[in-house]
Amino acid sequence: MLPGKVKVDIDYIAMKLGLAKSTVSKAMNGRPNISAATREKVRALAAKLNYVPDRLAQSLKTKRSYLIGLVMHEMKRDFFIEIARGVTLEAQRNGCQAVFASSEGSTENERALVRDFLSRRIDGLVVIPCIGGDHSHLQEVALGGYPLVIADNYVEGVDAPFVGTDFELGGYLAVKHLVKNGHRHLGLLLGPRDLPSTPERLAGYTRAMEESGLRLDPERVRYGDYSFAAGRAAAEALLAEFPETTAILCGNADLSEGAAAALAKLGKRVPDDLCLMDFGGARLPSVNQKNEEIGQAAARTLFRLINGETPARRNIVKPEIAVMGHSSSDISPWGTAPLEEKG
């Protein structure tokens, strides 16, 4: 520090504002037991003085990195972007930053990423696990007492809090919406049979059909990967066998895009000739899983673990129907124009 220069630190800010050092520290780190007015006053002066916290010094003192990690099984779709946004917002509220990584659907990559984050001494992890595969590494992390939260894709045998969607309610609401709009011949494109969310969705579909006086024909339910190719193949087979189908409900946006390509190939228009609906998509009527809320709830649960508290073991977010998906337009992006075939 040059002669005559004032060292701008928490002590100096506390002295200038007439506050306790602990109060300034809590305000800078977003602690909840500080008033909004005090927090803004502290942060305004810190910004004016160009104060930058010494994270290394803080880490040495508190044994914390002030970083949390989010491991996703892929980094695409609004679904994952919105969850990441929710995690980011909650991290910032707690005076931390979030770091993201993608396993790209590989449990080996997932295992390596989790170990890498642990080696970097981040404060805790939110993991959206890959579909299928061996997740024993997550149980090892949980048993080791490291703060860990599982989001979206529930994994049996991992002793960690879970945050996700009420898939049964989502399936129920979707079918009720379609039936209310006059559809009686429905096709369902689901994910893998052994995925925990698959029977939950099916239970919701079945309940809604029964309440509506309809029977769910098992032949109209197709299972497969959550992929464009699977959606296209399943929709082609479904419509070949049941050409009277008026609506297809898809488990995610990849499946609905594949189904859309199949319809385009057949010269059908959405929604004039056939209605498409999905979970979590942005271009169709959809089941809004409230992804950002899931991200915030997952991060909030994680910070409770980091702070030594005992959060709920399951936090299930209630979905709702978004008639226009997540689009702010008054006209569906797919409207009544012919669909273009992809791939």
Image (tube, grey):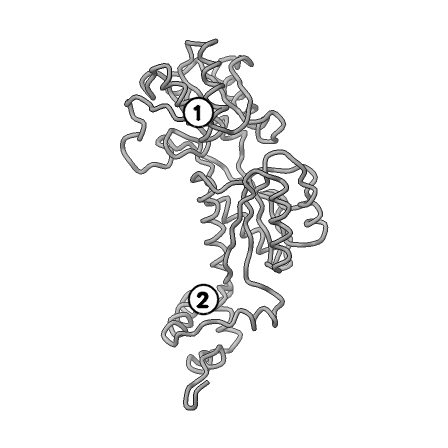
Is 186 situated left or right of 105 in this image?
Answer: left
Q: Which of 173 and 145 is in front in this view?
A: 145
Q: Please, what secondary structure does the residue beneath circle 2 have?
A: loop
User: Which mark, residue 35?
Assistant: 2
Is 145 situated left or right of 259 in this image?
Answer: right
- Specify few, some or many for label 2: CA neighbours under 10 Å numbering under 14, 14-19, or 20 or more: few
Q: Please, what secondary structure does the residue beneath circle 1 have?
A: helix
User: Which mark, residue 177?
Assistant: none
Please identify the quarter of the rendering in which residue 246 is found. Answer: top left
Q: In what quadrant of the picture does the C terminus appear?
A: top left
Q: Residue at x 54, y 44 (%)?
A: 72
Q: Residue at x 63, y 53 (%)?
A: 147
Q: Label 1 near label 2: C-beta < 8 Å?
A: no
Name the N-terminal-most of marks 2 and 1. Answer: 2
Q: In this view, does 239 lie above or below 342?
A: above
Residue 335: x and y in percent read 29, 26
- Which residue position holds label 1? 258
Q: Residue at x 50, y 18 (%)?
A: 209
Q: Nearer the viewer, residue 57 or 10?
A: 57
Identified by mark 1, the residue type is Gly
- Specify few, some or many for label 1: CA neighbours under 10 Å numbering under 14, 14-19, or 20 or more: many
Total marks placed: 2
User: Which numbered disc, 2 or 1, marks the residue closer to the eye?
Assistant: 1
Identified by mark 2, the residue type is Ser
Is 326 situated left or right of 226 in this image?
Answer: left
Marks 2 and 1, how far apart at CA? 51 Å
Q: Is residue 35 above or below residue 129?
A: below
Residue 329: x and y in percent read 28, 35
Please identify the quarter of the rendering in which residue 65 is found. Answer: bottom right
Residue 59: x and y in percent read 58, 68
Residue 80: x and y in percent read 47, 42
Residue most toward the front?
A: 343
